[in-house]
Amino acid sequence: MNIVKYKKNSKGNPPDEYDEMTPVKTILILAANPKKTSRLRLDEEVREIEKALRRSKYRNLFKIHSVWAVGHRDIRQALLEYEPTFVHFIGHGRENGLMVENEFGTAVRFSTKAFSELFKLCADHIECIILNACYTEPLSNAITKHIDYVIGMKMAIKDKASIEFAAGFYDALGAGRTVDDAFAFGRTAIMAQFPDLPDYLIPSLKKKTGLINLQFCMESTGDIYYIRTSSDSIISALKSRIINELELPINFENGKQIPYFLFSKTQDKIMEENKTLFENDVKENETFVFLIEVDETASS
């Protein structure tokens, strides 16, 4: 579950500025171009990603780490060291995995099953994986069981097209747009570069099923948060996680704890504690107020 805080704007609409407490997101770039495989412009793609974020509105919210000539161990070690939010692979793909390097710099296959299982172990901090390599859609289908967003390529893609996609994607991401929007901007960048070709259809976005985006406001402070969580989340468990992550105070009255509850502005009702979001009929982008129960019959 990811909770992101935003600053309020004067009109009360969805805010357009990140709060200073919003965590920095780490982007891990993994690059591999083994010997005896066709040469790729890896350095150009990395430069375009860096340029896109450096000139972006929210550049201070992203940190980039690049690891070159990666093999199996390098990828595992980098995931453990940097705990990235985004992982961007540049290199060669096959329908049965990715081509990485061994200790001699020659190509070895990182199988779909092994790659998927590795990222399953990192699902708590990875939000999106971009596999900017040919024939990676089968791999993205496998990984999306564990990761919210996975972008792969349906077939072979031109080097220039993959670079244009990366530039468009990170231009949008750095401007505060969602992964869905960034994917669309990446596709549009390919379309602009190759206006007479269908290359923009090669990138494919897969999403983990059962996830939902919500917005909630703290009644006491007016702070606005965005949250992405499973539709199977039970309301009572979701509340506990929000309270713990935001370190909200636990209040007591006459020796009894005063509970928080979720009030849906969209549905104009309080969520039932022992039911899931799905069972409460919560919809995508529903808006809530996080309230502390007050005994209105008590004397003032």
Image (cartoon, rainbow, N blue to C red):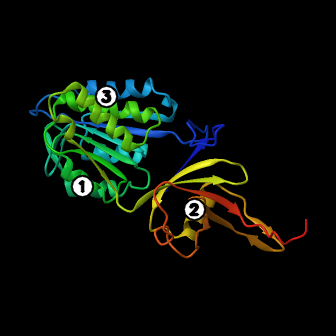
For residue 101, which quarter of the picture? top left
Task: Characterize the local packing of mark 3: few (<14), some (14-19) or many (20 or more) Cα atoms within 10 angstroms.
Answer: many
Question: Residue 212: horizontal and vertical position, in percent?
Answer: 44, 58
Q: Is residue 120 above or below residue 105?
A: below
Front tag of 2 and 3: 2
Query: Can you name the residue that lies furthest to the bottom here?
Result: 274
Q: Which mark is residue 241?
A: 2
Say which residue label 3 marks: 46
In the picture provided, is 217 more to the left or to the right than 49?
A: right
For residue 108, which quarter of the picture? top left
For marks 2 and 3, the one nearer the N-term is 3
Question: Residue 42: horizontal and vertical position, in percent?
Answer: 24, 28
The quadrant the C terminus occupies is bottom right
Measured in 3D between alpha carbons, the distance from the residue under mark 2 to the one under mark 3, in whole angstroms, is 37 Å
| Near-viewer residue (114 or 214) | 214
Q: Residue at x 16, y 40 (%)?
A: 134
